[in-house]
Image (spheres, coloured by chain):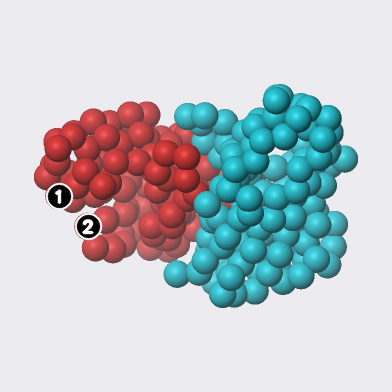
Chain colours: A cyan, B red
Amino acid sequence: GAVVSQHPSRVICKSGTSVKIECRSLDFQATTMFWYRQFPKQSLMLMATSNEGSKATYEQGVEKDKFLINHASLTLSTLTVTSAHPEDSSFYICSALTTAYEQYFGPGTRLTVT
Amino acid sequence: SQQGEEDPQALSIQEGENATMNCSYKTSINNLQWYRQNSGRGLVHLILIRSNEREKHSGRLRVTLDTSKKSSSLLITASRAADTASYFCATDAFPQGAQKLVFGQGTRLTINP
């Protein structure tokens, strides 16, 4: 199946700093990628839809100025958590959409803000 | 918002037994997908069933879809310890092209050796 990677897999940062997470589709091109957030023992919550060459679409309640998304190429989307705070600590997962409308997920990034 | 509800929330069975998980949803869909997630890891795509399909098989997995009841089930036969994971159903919003997935709350499956 299609492979999606995320980098880094784990990151610890201090409160007030910014963190960038990369999502790459390794063997296919994806005009659409998605960013999810998952709290412990909970399901995935969609944060935003990332579209190559255009602005991301954010879900209700997600601050677009805090969670910056850039989909600069057909294989790369980045999520930047700006001015991170401890409540931003979570598991962030991206997915990429194939032309067959299947979503393949990255392995996730564990963000801890101290 | 979460439109999927999964039942049961947790399931613990003996190795070799069959495991059945159910998923209900609220709106019309194009497709329903099942995913597996090992603790602290990403999601693994298991199977996709389209709205015009009623049953689909993949190895030890059997998925059914009843659009009249807005429900789906995932059956894992002859379970193994390695099947221990959380299982999520996900539906995409209608009409075609939205492609945003809405996940159920998940079922935590534990296979006891």
Q: Which mark is residue B94?
A: none
| Chain where mark 1 sits | B
| Quarter residue B12 falls in | top left
Closest to the observer, A19 or B31 = A19
The reply to whether discs 2 and 1 touch (Cβ–Cβ < 8 Å) is yes
Judged left or right of residue A1, residue A105 is: right
Instruction: Say which residue appears at 26% left-offset and 47% top-offset.
Output: B82
Q: Is residue A45 visible?
A: no
Q: Secondary structure at mark 2?
A: loop
Amino acid type of the residue tagged 2 in the rendering: Arg
Judged left or right of residue A6, residue B90 is: left
Badge 2 crowding class, 10 Å Cα cut-off, few under 14, some 14 to 19, many 20 or more, is few
Judged left or right of residue A82, residue B66 is: left
| Quarter residue A112 falls in | top right
Instruction: Say which residue appears at 73% left-offset and 59% top-offset.
Output: A77
Q: Both on one chain, marks 2 and 1? A: yes
Amino acid type of the residue tagged 1 in the rendering: Ala
**Residue at which label 2 appears:** B60
Real-space Cα distance between discs 2 and 1? 7 Å
**Residue at which label 1 appears:** B78
Q: Is residue B77 above or below residue A74?
A: above
Instruction: Say which residue appears at 71% left-offset and 64% top-offset.
Output: A76
Position in image of residue B37 (x %, y %): 42, 45
Closest to the observer, B91 or A35 = A35
Position in image of residue A57 (x %, y %): 79, 51
Residue lying farthest to the left in this orientation: B16
Position in image of residue B79 (x %, y %): 19, 46
Badge 1 crowding class, 10 Å Cα cut-off, few under 14, some 14 to 19, many 20 or more, is some
Position in image of residue A89 (x %, y %): 66, 30
Q: Quadrant of the C terminus of chain A?
A: top right
Instruction: Say which residue appears at 81% left-offset and 40% top-offset.
Output: A18
